[in-house]
Image (cartoon, rainbow, N blue to C red):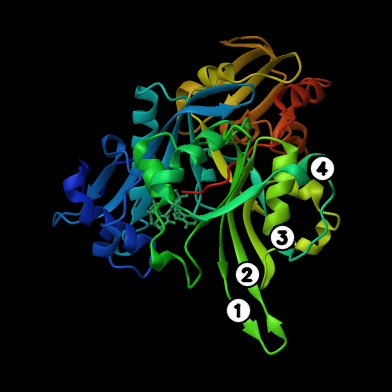
């Protein structure tokens, strides 16, 4: 275990220390907004999962927390996942091992609570691999020109899209209901009241000159929601005319016609020249609806990072898209209980994982197990990069098919 530098000590954090927490947070993430203003916003923190480190003079100089994702979607199932978040170290105390210490605490506490997996969004992609987190999902950032041609979907033109200013009081239930219904590995939803409130908070100082959040909503004739988009517009003018930008935060649709109707509205807003779209799954309907996807200058980014904390519990909590029976030789520098040989027997409706002395088929580090965990990155692709080794010839292909999943993993929100 990593120990703290002399005089530093680990502390539990409570709501009374909110201002200290926001002070560390604004040192780590210089948003330019004073902590007294941030303190007026609803906080997403689950305080019973929030810990800090004090320097010898008692100042809080590092913190981390985790979201309790109790129904985190994994291939074919849902399981409890510890969502590491609010990680920050004061710049005057960095590179002394405070993050490493906090990660070890996070692993231990998560395991105590029975959370076999941890997941996070990384501020910088180079940080977390060393702790065994693998890049389990990627997403697309798109710049869609106004009026981009979209393919037709039967029924889309009959749907009515209502557009309103977002009203958290009125719209929270509808947004949550639609978001929670999505069946996609990694699609974490806002499960706690704190998280739901903070997601819809929309302070002016984070709008960068754009309007407040707007909601486009599609409902059935009986008023039940089918999908929504959250977006905001920012005006812009040049001599030749309007050049506004639509910033799309999230588009969630339960069926193809709803997705087509929502994107149809977003791509046809007056005075706008383009849409900036953050973090859509790599197989999101918009990618297939666009007649000219190349015109979007698509960028691939990292989405969720996954850390398998308990190999047998994690691998038996998910399902496999085809029958699989494989022995994995796993290395894990931080959680020794994971190291060794595991037989994974699974299929679309079952999975068991047991320790074994049998000869191993594949060898890999726990980081690669995290990368493959949500079914979006093939074990064969990882073998192509030298990160998975096929010890018994002929076993890689079947394992790669079994560990895959027909729907790409990913999530639309990142904090
Ligand atoms: C990133 C951050 C938390 C690191 O904290 P820290 O206490 O300096 O980290 P540690 O000293 O424990 O470093 C642990 C390891 O991570 C590495 N590391 C730390 N920050 C890194 C970064 N930004 N990029 C790459 N590697 C990094 C260290 O070099 C060290 O590597 P080693 O174990 O191989 O020697 C801190 O710099 C910070 O708060 N940054 C700004 C906010 C942020 O990015 N938070 C993360 C949110 S997801």
First along the sequence among labels 3 and 4? 4
Disc 3 secondary structure class: loop
Residue 2 drawn above or below residue 222: below
Tell which circle, 1 or 2, labels the residue nearer the N-terminal end.
1
Q: Residue at x 55, y 37 (%)?
A: 179
Residue 358 coordinates in the image, percent (x, y): 66, 9
Name the quadrant where ligand 1 sits.
Answer: bottom left
The residue lying toward the viewer, choosing from 282 and 209, is 209
CA–CA distance between discs 1 and 4?
Answer: 32 Å
Instruction: Using the numbered discs, state the Cα–Cα distance from disc 1 to disc 2 in whole angstroms.
Output: 7 Å
SS state under label 4? loop
Which residue bears the numbered disc 4? 153
Q: Is residue 355 above or below residue 89?
A: above
Q: Residue at x 43, y 25 (%)?
A: 115
Residue in front for this viewpoint, 185 or 320: 185
Q: How crowded is mark 1: few (under 14 residues within 10 Å), some or many (20 or more)?
A: few
Q: Which of marks 1 and 4 is in front?
A: 4
Q: Which class describes the residues within 10 Å of circle 3: few (<14), some (14-19), or many (20+)?
A: many
Query: Which is closer to the viewer, label 3 or label 2?
Result: 3
Q: Mark 2 points at which residue?
A: 245
Front position in the image: 122 or 56: 122
Of the numbered discs 1 and 4, the one sitting upstream in the chain is 4
Q: Position of residue 241 (x, y in %)?
A: 70, 83
How far apart are the alpha carbons under marks 3 and 4? 16 Å
On residue 267, the disc is 3
Q: Is residue 267 left or right of residue 93?
A: right
Among the two numbered marks 3 and 2 on one chain, the one whose residue lies closer to the N terminus: 2
């Amino acid at each position: 275990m990593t120990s703290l530098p002399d005089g530093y000590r680990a502390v539990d954090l409570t709501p009374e220390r909110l201002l200290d927490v926001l002070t560390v947070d604004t040192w780590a993430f210089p948003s330019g907004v004073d902590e007294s203003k941030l303190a007026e916003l609803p906080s997403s923190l689950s305080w019973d999962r929030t810990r800090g480190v004090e320097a010898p003079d008692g100042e809080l100089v590092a913190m981390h927390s985790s979201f309790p994702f109790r129904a985190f979607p994994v291939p074919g199932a849902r399981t409890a996942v510890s969502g590491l978040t609010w990680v920050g170290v004061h710049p005057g105390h960095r590179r002394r091992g405070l993050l490493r210490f906090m990660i070890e605490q996070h692993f231990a506490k998560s395991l105590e609570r029975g959370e076999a997996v941890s997941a996070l969004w990384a501020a910088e992609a180079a940080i977390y691999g060393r702790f065994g987190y693998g890049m389990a999902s990627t997403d697309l950032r798109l710049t869609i020109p106004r009026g981009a041609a979209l393919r037709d979907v039967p029924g889309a033109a009959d749907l009515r899209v209502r557009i309103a200013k977002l009203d958290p009081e009125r719209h929270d239930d509808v947004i949550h209901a639609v978001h929670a219904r999505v069946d996609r590995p990694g699609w974490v939803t806002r499960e706690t009241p704190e998280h739901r409130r903070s997601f819809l908070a929309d302070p002016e100082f984070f709008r960068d000159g754009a309007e407040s959040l707007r909601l486009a909503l599609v409902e059935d004739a009986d008023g039940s929601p089918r999908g929504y988009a959250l977006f905001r517009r920012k005006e812009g003018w040049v001599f030749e005319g309007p050049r506004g930008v639509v910033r799309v935060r999230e588009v969630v649709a339960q069926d193809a016609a709803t997705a087509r109707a929502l994107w149809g509205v977003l791509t046809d807003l007056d005075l706008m020249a383009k849409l900036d779209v953050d973090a859509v799954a790599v197989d999101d309907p918009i990618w297939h609806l666009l007649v000219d996807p190349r015109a979007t200058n698509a960028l691939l980014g990292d989405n969720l990072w996954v850390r398998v904390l308990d190999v047998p519990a994690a691998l038996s909590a998910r399902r496999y898209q085809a029958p699989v029976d494989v022995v994995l030789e796993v290395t894990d520098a931080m959680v020794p209980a994971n190291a060794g040989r595991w037989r994974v027997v699974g299929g679309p409706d079952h999975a068991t994982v047991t320790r074994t002395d049998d000869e191993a088929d594949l060898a890999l580090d726990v980081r690669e197990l995290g990368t493959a965990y949500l079914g979006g990155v093939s074990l064969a692709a990882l073998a192509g990069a030298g990160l998975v080794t096929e010890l018994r010839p002929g076993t890689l292909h079947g394992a790669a098919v079994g560990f895959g999943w027909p729907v790409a993993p990913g999530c639309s929100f990142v904090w």
